[in-house]
């Protein structure tokens, strides 16, 4: 991509108009961000139907290499951007986090589609993660089911704008230049259900509390208004039951024909069987008649 020096001449030091195409006075952060924003390499992997739209965005019609997302790398060690394109199942989130840890800094995550952003139509499903941001730091969300290539391009441009706002002087913007090495994201544990290792202390405390007081397990206090309504309904039901006692005749159910329910059901099944045999015989006679006419 060609360098436009006029875009970099946004400083307090004036540059003569005749030299704006030859001289640029800028900051190190701005030059650093310009190089990063125009050389983003996405990682080559897809999860579901959103991956088809991502492939279309990389193809010749939309061609996101025009914006600096030049080539898609098949290894995380050469990628800057992870595009989570599709439904993230609890089984798949484990290798996704592992691949993210293998990507070098600086690295970014783009959640493409409703499933990667918040679960989509499978939200709260037994095997689907309700959003990739529960396990990885997501930088840009692209809504849609699936998003169009134009929407994905807009999300990529939004990521570039985010990079433009980062500063080397601010440690929060560029944590990869910190004193110590960055801690890897804990890889989830897949068992009977997905477990985030960052929540192990909370899970352990809840398990110990449940083991100590089993009677309070899964019980929560209702609001005061709800308790009052429930008590009033229970009192009304008790009063009605006391005022109108149930007789033994009301508990015995007899069909209009005078038989028991199971006897009536057997009679209905017998009638259905006879009607089915009659229809079968009628179809056989019609086929025989057609064969004789031919």
Image: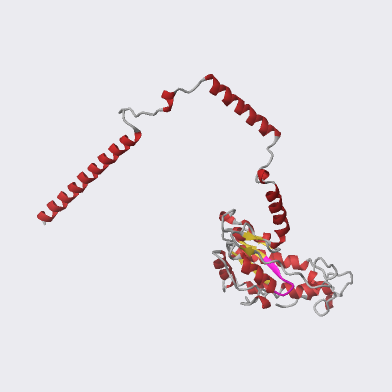
Towards the viewer: 59 or 225: 225
Q: Hey, which residue is sitting farthest left in the picture?
A: 292
Q: Residue at x 67, y 30 (%)?
A: 228
Q: How is the image coloured?
A: secondary structure
Question: Residue 63, position in %: x, y?
Answer: 60, 72
Q: Quarter of the image for the C terminus: give it.
A: bottom left
Q: Quadrant of residue 173?
A: bottom right
Q: Quarter of the image for the N terminus: give it.
A: bottom right
Horizontal placement of 211 versus 9: left or right? left
Horizontal placement of 88 versus 38: left or right? left
| Count of numbered badges drawn on the protein | 0
Q: Main secondary structure of the magenta part?
A: loop
Residue 242 in view (yes/no) = yes
Q: Is residue 257 magenta?
A: no
Q: Hey, which residue is sitting farthest top in the picture?
A: 243
Question: Residue 145, position in %: x, y?
Answer: 57, 58
Question: Residue 127, position in %: x, y?
Answer: 56, 58
Q: Hey, which residue is sitting farthest bottom in the picture?
A: 22
Question: Residue 114, position in %: x, y?
Answer: 60, 58
**Magenta region:** 103-109
Q: Residue at x 60, y 28 (%)?
A: 234
Q: Quadrant of residue 269?
A: top left
Residue 28, above or below 208: below
Q: Quadrant of residue 271?
A: top left
Q: Residue at x 66, y 68 (%)?
A: 97
Residue 8 in view (yes/no) = no
Towards the viewer: 274 or 141: 274
Q: Hey, which residue is sitting farthest front in the picture?
A: 212
Towards the viewer: 120 or 144: 120
């Amino acid at each position: 991509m060609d360098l436009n020096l006029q875009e970099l001449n946004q400083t307090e030091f004036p540059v003569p108009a005749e030299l704006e195409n030859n001289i640029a006075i800028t900051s190190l952060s701005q030059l650093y961000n310009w190089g990063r924003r125009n050389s983003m390499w996405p990682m080559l992997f897809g999860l579901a139907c959103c991956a088809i739209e991502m492939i279309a965005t990389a193809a010749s019609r939309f061609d996101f290499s025009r914006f600096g997302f030049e080539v898609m790398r098949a290894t995380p060690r050469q990628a800057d951007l992870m595009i989570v394109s599709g439904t993230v199942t609890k089984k798949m989130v484990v290798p996704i986090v592992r691949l993210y840890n293998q990507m070098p800094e600086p690295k970014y995550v783009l959640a493409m589609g409703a499933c990667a952003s918040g679960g989509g139509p499978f939200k709260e499903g037994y095997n689907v993660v309700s959003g990739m941001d529960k396990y990885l730091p997501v930088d840009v969300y692209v809504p849609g089911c699936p998003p169009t290539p134009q929407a994905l391009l807009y999300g990529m441009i939004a990521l570039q704008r985010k990079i433009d706002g980062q500063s080397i002087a601010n440690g929060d913007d560029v944590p990869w230049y910190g004193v110590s090495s960055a801690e890897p994201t804990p890889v989830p544990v897949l068992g009977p259900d997905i477990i985030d290792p960052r929540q192990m202390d909370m899970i352990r405390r809840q398990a110990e509390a449940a083991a100590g007081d089993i009677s309070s397990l899964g019980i929560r206090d209702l609001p005061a208004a709800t308790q009052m309504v429930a008590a009033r309904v229970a009192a009304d039901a008790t009063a009605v039951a006391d005022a109108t006692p149930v007789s033994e005749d009301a508990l015995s159910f007899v069909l209009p024909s005078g038989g028991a329910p199971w006897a009536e059901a057997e009679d209905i099944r017998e009638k259905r069987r006879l009607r089915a045999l009659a229809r079968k015989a009628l179809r056989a006679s019609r086929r025989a008649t057609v064969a004789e006419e031919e």
